[in-house]
Image (spheres, rainbow, N blue to C red):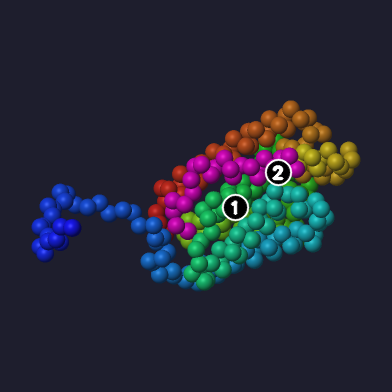
């Protein structure tokens, strides 16, 4: 026979202390109503159109096989795509693109702008351009200033004024340098495949193996790579220090 079930269950002793609440696995987007940002969407769409227009002008005015080899053109193509996707997500209240993608795009267009203004367009630089490349005119000047000045400034303003701070991380900085490293390999390989004496065999004077040799070119690349990593680190630090717009 089994024991009878008692009608009255004695009170259990109280558990000492406050029960700790476990972190909720529900993401913030599930409880916070998504907000459309039409102003941000319009600004980003304009940036995308400006970058696309600058690249298109460069392709129409020059040799496409040579134009597409420039770092500034490639970085602006990436900027146009990223800004177009970001504009769509801001308009439809979607999630923003990953911070790693935005940080990489920002870094590349800023690199293109700084290299141009500090090394190529600076008469005091040993790598300054000469002739028409140094002072383009007409539509070439419009495309030139769009890709090297207008779109980089617009990308920085979008980052400072329209994005949430703290999304960039130092661990991402080394991964961002994979593209400049791949570009270095592309530039040197392209120069080897072209015949000696071909115009613009090496697109940048600091990567000109014919003039300086591999030893000096690789030294230039190392100094630039260290500068790019320092710039990436600075962007991460500023992203965590800047106020939330």
Alpha carbon of mark 2 to alpha carbon of mark 1: how far?
15 Å
Callout 2–callout 1 Cβ contact below 8 Å: no
Q: Which residues are magenta?
A: 163-186
- The answer to whether any part of residue 145 appears in the image is no
**Residue situated in front as seen by the camera: 1 or 237:** 1
As drawn, is 153 to the left or to the right of 15? right
Where is residue 80? Give x, y as percent.
Answer: 64, 61
Badge 2 or badge 1: first in the primary sequence: 1
Q: Which residue corresponds to the image point at 60% horizontal and 59% vertical from the top-left? A: 82
Q: Which residue corresponds to the image point at 74% horizontal and 62% vertical from the top-left? A: 56
Q: Quadrant of the C terminus?
A: bottom left
Q: Which residue corresponds to the image point at 61% horizontal and 65% vertical from the top-left? A: 84
**Residue situated in front as seen by the camera: 3 or 98:** 3
- Badge 1 marks a residue whose secondary structure is helix
- Give the residue pinned by disc 2: 183
Q: Residues within 10 Å of mark 2 (few under 14, many from 20)?
A: some
Magenta highlight on residue 174: yes
As drawn, is 133 to the left or to the right of 118? right
- Give the residue pinned by disc 1: 105
As drawn, is 15 to the left or to the right of 67? left
């Amino acid at each position: 026979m089994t024991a009878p079930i008692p009608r009255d269950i004695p009170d259990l002793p109280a558990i000492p202390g406050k029960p700790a609440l476990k972190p909720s696995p529900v993401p913030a987007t599930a409880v916070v109503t998504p907000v459309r940002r039409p102003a941000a969407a319009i600004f980003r769409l304009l940036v995308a159109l400006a970058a696309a227009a600058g690249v298109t002008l460069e392709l129409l005015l020059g040799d496409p096989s040579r134009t597409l080899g420039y770092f500034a053109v490639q970085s602006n193509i990436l900027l146009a795509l990223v800004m177009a996707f970001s504009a769509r997500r801001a308009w439809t209240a979607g999630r923003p693109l990953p911070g790693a993608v935005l940080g990489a795009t920002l870094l590349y267009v800023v690199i293109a702008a700084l290299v141009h203004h500090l090394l190529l367009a600076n008469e005091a630089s040993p790598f300054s351009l000469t002739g028409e490349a140094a002072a383009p005119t007409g539509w070439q000047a419009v495309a030139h200033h769009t890709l090297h000045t207008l779109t980089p400034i617009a990308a920085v303003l979008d980052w400072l004024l329209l994005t949430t701070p703290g999304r960039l991380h130092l661990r991402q900085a080394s991964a961002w340098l994979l593209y400049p490293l791949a570009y270095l390999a592309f530039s040197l390989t392209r120069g080897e495949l072209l015949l000696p004496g071909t115009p613009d065999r090496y697109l940048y004077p600091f990567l000109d193996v014919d003039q300086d040799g591999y030893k000096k070119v690789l030294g230039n690349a190392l100094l630039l790579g260290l500068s790019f990593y320092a710039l990436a680190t600075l962007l991460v630090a500023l992203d965590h220090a800047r106020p939330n717009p």
